[in-house]
């Protein structure tokens, strides 16, 4: 399965990270393979982040991960591998 996470700034541009994920029970482990950058009319620029030996590998808990503890139709809350809390909300992507 694939994952993409990013910061979207409407017509100004965006910065996203794209890669593989694995989901087991409440743990979502991921490994980013690409950074995508678009600034104004330039881009998007796709930068390879993965080492050749890691391409196609299924992420494990040795990679970054989140443990989900609340999800509904509008928000999601999880604890990251480093102990921090992350919040997401559903939004409309502006291009």
Image (tube, helix red, strand yellow):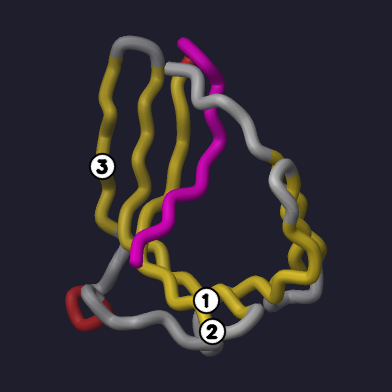
**Quadrant housing residue 85:** bottom right
Residue 89: image x %, image y %? 70, 41
- Judging from the image, what secondary structure is the residue with disc 3 in? strand
- Is residue 92 or residue 30 the one in the foreground? 92
Main secondary-structure element of the magenta-colored stretch: strand
- Residue at image position (65%, 79%) is 26
The alpha-carbon separation of the residues under discs 2 and 3 comes to 29 Å
Residue underneath mark 2: 24
**Image vertical order of residue 83 relative to residue 70, above or below:** below
Circle 3 crowding by C-alpha within 10 Å: few under 14, some 14–19, many from 20: some
Q: Earlier in the sequence, mark 2 or mark 1?
A: 2
Report if the CB atoms under discs 2 and 1 are less than 8 Å apart.
yes
9 relative to 88 in the view: left or right: left
- Judging from the image, what secondary structure is the residue with disc 2 in? strand
Circle 1 crowding by C-alpha within 10 Å: few under 14, some 14–19, many from 20: many
- Residue at image position (52%, 16%) is 10
33 relative to 4 in the view: left or right: left
Magenta region, residue range = 1-11
**Image vertical order of residue 22 relative to residue 44, above or below:** below
Q: Is residue 43 magenta?
A: no
């Amino acid at each position: 399965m694939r994952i993409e996470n990013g910061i979207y700034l409407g017509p100004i541009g965006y910065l996203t990270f794209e890669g593989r994920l694995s989901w087991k029970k409440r743990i979502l482990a991921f490994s980013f393979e690409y950074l995508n950058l678009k600034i104004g009319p330039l881009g998007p620029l796709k930068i390879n982040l993965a080492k050749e030996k890691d391409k196609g590998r299924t992420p494990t808990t040795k990679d970054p991960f989140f443990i989900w503890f609340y999800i509904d139709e509008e928000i999601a809350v999880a604890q990251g591998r480093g102990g921090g809390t992350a919040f997401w909300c559903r939004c409309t992507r502006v291009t």
